[in-house]
Amino acid sequence: GDSVTQMEGPVTLSEEAFLTINCTYTATGYPSLFWYVQYPGEGLQLLLKATKADDKGSNKGFEATYRKETTSFHLEKGSVQVSDSAVYFCALMKAGANSKLTFGKGITLSVRP
Amino acid sequence: GAGVSQTPSNKVTEKGKYVELRCDPISGHTALYWYRQSLGQGPEFLIYFQGTGAADDSGLPNDRFFAVRPEGSVSTLKIQRTERGDSAVYLCASSLFRYRNTEAFFGQGTRLTVV
C-alpha cells in the first residue's frame, strides 16, 4: 500500500541554521504531496504542496520539490527561526475514489535562539 | 467559528464504555474526514464523508467504530466497548471538494484516554 517515510527525529537547530527534513514515498500512480505543520497547542496546518512531478511548493520560506525519479519531497529552509519549532508531517494524497491523506510519522523540530 | 471545531478536547473513559466525539466542520465544506493519531505516529485515515454519506470507511479498525453525518454538516464518531488501545488523538478535517486535492483544514483534535 501507499506509505510515507520521514527521517528520524527529533531535530534541534540553532536559529538561522539551514534545515532539511527528508521525506520519501511509495505509491502507485501520481500522488499529490504535502507538508503539514503542527505548532504547539494548535491543529495541523497545510504548509505547502505539490501536485505533479518537478513542481516546487513554497510557503513561509520553506520549499519542497516533487522528485518522481527519487520518490522524494524533502523540506528545506535556508534560515530557521525559533517560531519554526513545531512537528512537521509529510503526506501524500492520490486523486480518485480512494483519495485520502497518508501521513509519515512526523518529526519534531526545535530551534534554539 | 471560522475553523473546524472538535468537542470535547479531552475525554477520559473507562474500558468498556461508549464514547461519542463531535466534529463541526467549516461551514459549506462538503467533505469531512476522521483520522486517528497515536503517540509518536502520524494521523491515520479512518473515514471520509461526502455530504451525508460515508464514501470511504476503509480505515475504521473494527465494528466498534462508527461515524455519522446525518445532515451533511456535524459529524459524530462513536466508539463502543472502548479498549485501552483506542487511546489516541482523534482528528477531524474538512474541505470544499475532495477530488481536486483542495486543502483539508484540521481541528485541534479530541484526546481520548481509555483507563
Image: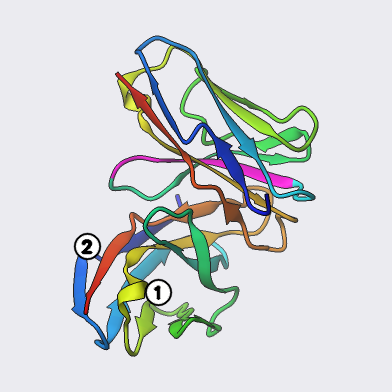
Where the C terminus of chain B falls, by quadrant? Answer: top left
Task: Looking at the picture, tell me which residue is in the foreground, A82 or A71.
Answer: A82
Asked if marks 2 and 1 fall on the same chain, the answer is yes
Residue carrying label 1: A72
**Above or below: residue B37 compared with residue B15:** below
**Above or below: residue B109 compared with residue A13:** above
Q: Position of residue A39 (x, y in %)?
A: 40, 61
Dots 2, 1 in contact, CB < 8 A: no
Residue in the image at 48% along x and 22% along y: B62
Mark 1 is surrounded, within 10 Å at the Cα level, by few (under 14), some (14 to 19) or many (20 or more) other residues, namely many
Residue carrying label 2: A8
Which region of the structure is painted magenta? B31-39
Q: Residue under mark 2: which chain is it in?
A: A
Task: Looking at the picture, tell me which residue is in the foreground, B86 or A103.
Answer: B86
Q: Residue under mark 1: which chain is it in?
A: A
Q: Main secondary structure of the magenta part?
A: strand
Q: Secondary structure at mark 2?
A: loop
Q: Position of residue A64 (x, y in %)?
A: 45, 80
